[in-house]
Amino acid sequence: MHDGYAYCEIRLLFFYLKSLLRKIIFLRMTKNNEWWRGCVMYQVYPRSYCDANGDGIGDLRGIISKLDYIASLGVDAVWISPFFKSPMKDFGYDVSDYRDVDPIFGSIQDFLELLKEAHRLGLKILIDQVWSHTSDQHRWFKDSRQCRSNHMADWYIWADPQPDGTPPNNWMSYQVGPAWTWDGRRRQYYLHHYIPEQPALNLRNPNVRQEIKNTAAFWLDLGVDGFRVDALHTHIYDKDLRSNPARAGNNFNNSRDVPDSNPMSFQDRIYTVNTPENIVWVEEIREHINKWEGRCLLAEVGGDNTEKDAVDYCQTDKRMHMAYSYGLVKSDMSKKCLTKTIGKVEEIIDDGWMCWSIGNHDIKRVLNRVNPHYADKAALAKYLMALLLSLRGTPCIYQGEELGLPQAELAFEDLVNPFDISLYPDHMGSDGARTPMPWMKTAPNAGFSNTTHKTWLPIPPGHVALAADRQEKDEQSILNEYKRFIAWRKGQDILLTGAFEFVEADGDILAYMRSLDDKKMLCVFNTSDSPASWNYDVDGLEAMEEVNHNASYDGKGFELAPYGYGFFRLTK
Ligand code: NOJ
Ligand code: CA
């Protein structure tokens, strides 16, 4: 009897240990599968990263040669903008073959090597997927435009003209002007939300949906860790092609992805962007992607209210893992703008997860949006970095931000981006944000390329002085501050996944509390170019000196130098 009892106890203990082990394994797996939550991402724009074959355009082998550099930043994941076959009318965002690498960038073998090497270095790789449109040179569109009855006739959005021959409705394109282009063969208009060479796919068609999913499977099987889904807001249009209403009021809206100089901004785009059917499609993609373990979907979300829509797309574990909006990418980073944009997200985010960035290949670089004439660019760059890397969500650094590159001022003749050209002189500044990376101060073309011809975009002399090799040797450089901060952040669970709450602060000081379990960290920033102070009397505030930048606390209040910042642990 006694023995039997002991046997029972041992079995129970064994059972308990087994279930504990299972729980630990499950937790570790979930944790690993959720690597994207709070990791640091880095965006590479391949044309401008590094040119290995000397033709003046960056390529995959160039990226491979810089993977050590990327890993040395301490980032966890890399999003690479498109490198697929393309006529390059929109520099790769016009794809003519989803499953092949454009010869300008290299080959599939090069990509596989890149992936392998990145994984060896512990870096995850996200690739861009452009599913809202293809190139007009894609085989599908070539077939589709032949006639109204061929097998791909309804793979794109075709519509009859109005009786007077004008386009079917008032939809506008990002490039300025109607979103419709006439095709003489079909005697119909086709839709393109961007340039005419980017016809919009008909993602209501189950065959198109299946093909897109097959494309995703192709890259997931090769081992990519996820996708940045391009222009998710423009995936599915109103079925009845209803005209958009005129925009109500002339309200300033930083959350709109289109500048006021584009007449598209005159409309409330209820029938063209972020339609309810988009969510259904997103859930279908997510279900598909879930078949591969530990992969992640990051959506680009534009539209008229990008914070709200971005949050919608990443709500619950049935949609995107994360999404980024336009609020900060376009922002002047004033306290008002930061409070509004971040506040809006925090209010509604619930269990969703944002990806925050303050720059990308489409928008003027952040240093020129924020106080462009401020002399101490290094202080400004470090402050912006600390702010970005301490928000709740996954921060994404755009290549060159870690060097403090300002926007390149280009002459009209140097512009190549179709949107910049159409909107000139009041454009978004894509080309000036895409100039080649300066790697070596004294090498030809700043070490980006050994071409004796012109690089695809010029390298501004001001960028050469900021070359990576120089900054590596300077302890106080922006680059080394990035490395230090990212390394420190890794050890701060509070910043990785903790809650976020604004703390009311005086004047231009922006403050927020991050907290996790019973731990709290106060993050304080001077958003202005003048010294600032704030009376804040709280017990047990301890400065985290490693990352403090000209911010002091004397027990009664804060003093911050222009663009100073500090992180303070609450010990009580
Ligand atoms: C967003 C991309 O970031 C941009 O570069 C591109 O022009 C449009 N989507 C269209 O694909
Ligand atoms: Ca090249």
Image (spheres, rainbow, N blue to C red):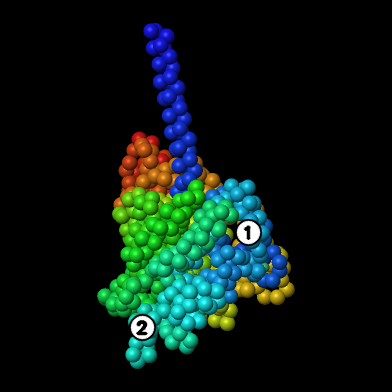
**Residue under the image location 40 percent in, 16 percent down:** 8
Q: Residues within 10 Å of mark 1 (few under 14, many from 20)?
A: many
In the picture as drawn, the residue positioned furthest to the top comes out as 2
Q: Nearer the viewer, residue 79 or 381?
A: 79
Residue 80 visible somewhere in the drawing? yes
Give the quadrant of residue 556.
Answer: top left
Question: Which of the pair 425/170 is nearer the observer?
Answer: 170
Say which label, 2 or 1, has the lower sequence index.
1
Q: Amino acid at mark 1?
A: Phe
Q: Are marks 2 and 1 in contact (CB under 8 Å)?
A: no
Q: Is residue 243 above or below residue 273?
A: below
Given this view, does label 2 or label 1 mark the residue nearer the observer? 2
Quadrant containing the N terminus in the rendered view: top left
Q: Amino acid at mark 2?
A: Pro
Query: How far from the left and from the top, in percent, is residue 141?
Result: 51, 76
Q: Residue, x 61% and y 73% (percent of image)? A: 457
* Mark 2, secondary structure of its residue: loop
- Residue 111 circle label: 1
Q: Residues within 10 Å of mark 2 (few under 14, many from 20)?
A: many
The residue under label 2 is 168
Q: How many marks?
A: 2
- Residue 121 location (% of width, % of height): 62, 48
Q: Is residue 384 visible?
A: no
